[in-house]
Amino acid sequence: FQGPSAMAQVCVFGVSGFVGSHLAEALLQKGYRVVGTLRNPDRNPAVRWLNELSNKHNQRLTLVHADMHDEATLGPALQGCTAVFFAAWAEVVEDDKVAAAAQGCRAVLSAAQLAGARVGLVTSSTGSTNPPSGQPEVKVEDQSWTDVGVQLEKAQSCTNAVCKRLVFGQVAKTMMDQAALDYETAHPDFRVVVFNPSLITGPCLSPEIKGGAGFVHSILQGRMAGAELPNDSMSMIDVRDLAALQVAGLESPSARGRYFAVRESWHWKDIICELKKLVPDFPAPLPFEGEPVTPTLFDMSRRDSLGVEVRDIPTILRETVEFLRIRRLVK
């Protein structure tokens, strides 16, 4: 798969989401015809702004109904597509729901192959890459796996939905990664590429604020005010760079397996300091006590092999704040 021909058509599963909409835009900009799936296109307000996106690109975005948990809807949606991007996700706060993402991902990959597609690209998370023994000196994709059993035991001590969402989310993403890679092992003529981002931020194509842009906005609105700053680090990527990496993964015939989709990791004190430069008067958290932990280090060789220039963290944060100012959410 070297790039779009005049007739190249791909599917973005979850096109109304933060990542899915940017995937659609990146693919349209490169000349692809895109089929975008929605669970309820007749009642989804996203249809309006997605149609506007299509109009900017000669109506090359077609919206269709599909549900990853209703296999009868998958074949018609994927018909004629040479690749599928799986960017659908739902929060998990119950242990009997953790397998749903893996089951849905596997169903979409299978239906895509049956419809003639040759490549499946999956948006996952670094939450699937946290070994129970702690972070290694440098994280490597094929050596860094979250232990599902350990996380499910940890969930038993969760006392609130936030804790459950974090723990079950890591379990669900890990199971989804394994299901996607196992599918390729069983079907070696179908190429699977999994991307593992952390905080995904940047501008939204939707009228509502989604993804990491909403998280950054909440920090600037005082989400962390009065609380002690976490002595921890956070890795991030701009959503447009994540989309570019995935398009490169599609167009690189040798791309297979997992790829860290982050720029790098910064300590929270440095993230807050950078935000203070951009919005000096926002209510910041209190300083923590003790020595700062070392930010997580990633082996970026696989990411860099895709040839995408990824924005640095000061640029990611600056452009997110600029977007929030355009939307009049930050002064």
Image (cartoon, grey):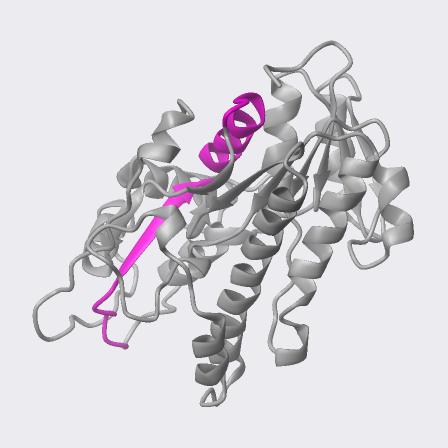
The x, y position of residue 123, in whole percent, is 56, 46
Instruction: Please name whichever residue, 271 or 92, is drawn nearer the observer in this view of the structure.
Output: 92
The x, y position of residue 109, in whole percent, is 72, 44
The x, y position of residue 272, in whole percent, is 24, 56
Is 253 located above or below residue 230 in the figure? Answer: above
Does the magenta-highlighted stretch encompass residue 242?
yes
Does the magenta-highlighted stretch encompass residue 16?
no
Let me know if residue 273 appears in the view.
Answer: yes
Find residue 35 and report its image quarter. top right
Q: How many marks?
A: 0
Find residue 94 and report its image quarter. bottom right
Is 211 located above or below residue 327 in the figure? Answer: below
Q: Residue at x 91, y 51 (%)?
A: 72
Q: Which residues are magenta?
A: 227-254
Q: Residue at x 70, y 42 (%)?
A: 15
State the quadrant of the N terminus.
top right
Q: Residue at x 45, y 90 (%)?
A: 157
Instruction: Please name whichever residue, 287 or 20, is drawn nearer the observer in this view of the structure.
Output: 20
Find residue 80 and report its image quarter. top right
Let me know if residue 94 appears in the view.
Answer: no
Q: Residue furthest left?
A: 291
Would residue 331 appear left or right of 35 to someone viewing this image?
A: left
The x, y position of residue 163, in whole percent, is 46, 79
